[in-house]
Image: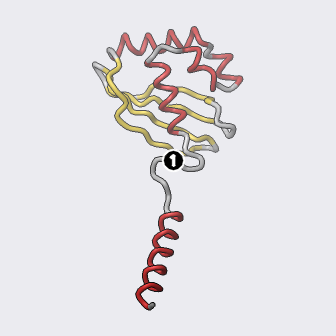
Amino acid sequence: MKTYIMLMLALVLTISFISCGEKKDSPKVGDLTPLATGFVESLVKEDFANAVKNFDKTMKGVMPEAKLQEAWQGLLSQSGSFKKQTGVRQTQEQGFNIVFVTCEFEKATLNIKVVFNDTNEISGLWFVP
């Protein structure tokens, strides 16, 4: 009987620890890295219509689909062909969430700085060394 109670207690504790643990595959609250890496993937696929979908009103005005395409093609002409994403990190500055997507190109490694506003829309974009 004692053994049965100990086994049940061990089972209950194990289930409790498993259910309380954080799942590593699911994004954390406020984690914008999937949105930023998805945006970069749209650029790589040259799906500029999809890339601008998450732009805020200001970005849609200053960088419509055609200008984004021009900027991306200019980047490729300077840095060479895109090879792969090599890293990602998120930070916060002046009330904005910023995701740096590090990308390897044929001639250079660059960070694509994607700035998000408080409604998770893209409100800024830079290509930085």
Image coordinates for residue 86, horizontal then vertical, percent = 34, 34
Three-letter code for the amino acid on which mark 1 is drawn: Ser
Left or right of 127 on screen, residue 66: right
| Residue 10, above or below 2 | above
User: Which of 65 and 61 lies nearest the eye of the viewer?
Assistant: 65
| Category of crowding for the residue at label 1, using alpha-carbon neighbours closer than 10 angstroms: few (below 14), some (14–19), many (at least 20) | few
Q: Point out the residue furthest to the right here.
A: 57
Q: Quadrant of residue 57?
A: top right
Image coordinates for residue 66, horizontal then vertical, percent = 57, 8
Image coordinates for residue 40, horizontal then vertical, percent = 47, 25
Left or right of 71 on screen, residue 123: right
Quadrant of the frame with the C terminus: top left
Which residue is at 45% across, 29% downward?
112
Secondary element at tag 1: loop
Which residue is at 64% across, 16% downward?
62
Quadrant of the frame with the N terminus: bottom left
User: Which of 37 and 1 lies nearest the eye of the viewer?
Assistant: 1
